[in-house]
Amino acid sequence: MPASRTTLRRSLAAAAALPLLIGALASCGYGSQAKNDEKKVAAEGEKLSADTVRLGYFPNLTHATALVGDQEGIIQKELGGTQLKVSTFNAGPSEIEALNADSIDIGFIGPSPAINGYSKSKGKNLRIIAGSASGGVKLVVNPAKIKTLDDIKGKRIATPQLGNTQDVAFLNWISEKGWKVDAQSGKGDVSVLRTDNKVTPDAYKSGSIDGAWVPEPTASKLVSEGAKVLLDESTLWPDNKFVITNIIVSQKFLTEHPDVVEAVLRGSVKTNEWINANQAKAKESANAKLKELTGKPLGAKVIDGAWPSITFTNDPLAATLQAQADHAVKAGLLKQPDLAGIYDLKPLNKVLKAAGQPEASDAGLGVK
């Protein structure tokens, strides 16, 4: 009987809190940019220093650590009685905006938005606290029009967004080929067309683009429409590794709630361990979460083509972040940033040491 009364009290408390939660989401002003995914299972165990932690990520396979960690309850388990509250985003800038507006505390995000957010705030709004994924980016093309890398010249190639991680990588690749493109307009020896990943497959089917430099699963969606993978970006990097997804935190939240940050990192590390030990189950879990968030799972052909190209790692691959910043500077999209202090890997390395894993390096870009 006491257990029943406790359950009833928890249910009433949850019901009372729901209108407040909905109101808070409406007031944050991100509407179409963010979708809240409140966990259906209440947090259990001892509460940490915060009642809730607000986590942001993309409904994207390169964010599968977040997808799986959320779907399987691994992150929530580490948080105990502290509630995990999730919002999803379609683009890095909107997630950085939410972090700056104190609408989320921690986020999974690509390197370019993290660099831009840190630079624009003069190093005051965020820290990178861990890696999450490497790879998962491909140049896919219409094989009837493009048969070799040199055939890219004169063609129309899509990237997701001006100045985003893939846009910077493609502009850098074009430059290294000796071709000229105006970074802002995308006009030149190659036509770079900034196209939302959601509409890129339709643009390919209509013939308005000849290919795309895009992350998964968009690349594999194009392949399912007859496109061919011409280049995997990982082949351009040392050891075939480059950061595609980091974990960031607001400096305020890191200072005020280090125990919560550490719990989220434990959840991330344990999720990556589970993913790497259970690839088939992890792929199903990520797809189940994508179905919940977007209303439609990825087809087997798409997810089977996309999944093997992504490596899930706790290492932030910090040296590659500096290289990506340098590429953005060379393209004229970014003034030379001072990235000193962008990393704080002390909480991650504490978690890794406890798990018997090697520490991660900040490549000299950590807080002093």
Image: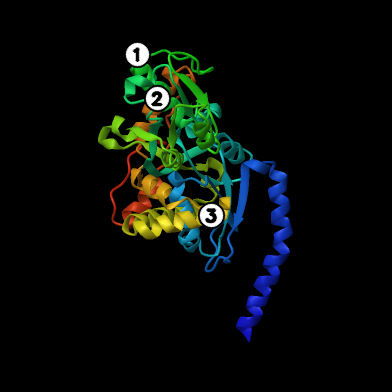
Disc 1 from disc 2: Cα separation: 21 Å
Q: The residue tagged with tag 2: helix, strand or loop?
A: loop
Residue behind mark 2: 145
Q: Earlier in the sequence, mark 3 or mark 1?
A: 1
Q: Earlier in the sequence, mark 2 or mark 3?
A: 2
Question: Which numbered circle lies on residue 291?
Answer: 3
Residue behind mark 1: 178
Q: Amino acid at mark 2?
A: Lys
Q: Amino acid at mark 1?
A: Gly
Q: Residue furthest bottom?
A: 1
- Which corner quadrant holds the C terminus? top left
- Which corner quadrant holds the N terminus? bottom right
Say if 234 sits above or below 311 in the image: above
Q: The residue tagged with tag 1: helix, strand or loop?
A: loop
**Total tally of numbered discs in the picture:** 3
* CB under 8 Å between discs 1 and 2: no
Q: Is residue 69 left or right of residue 38?
A: left
Instruction: Locate residue 110, reporting x and y percent.
Output: 46, 37
Instruction: Locate residue 63, reporting x and y percent.
Output: 46, 46
Disc 2 from disc 3: Cα separation: 34 Å
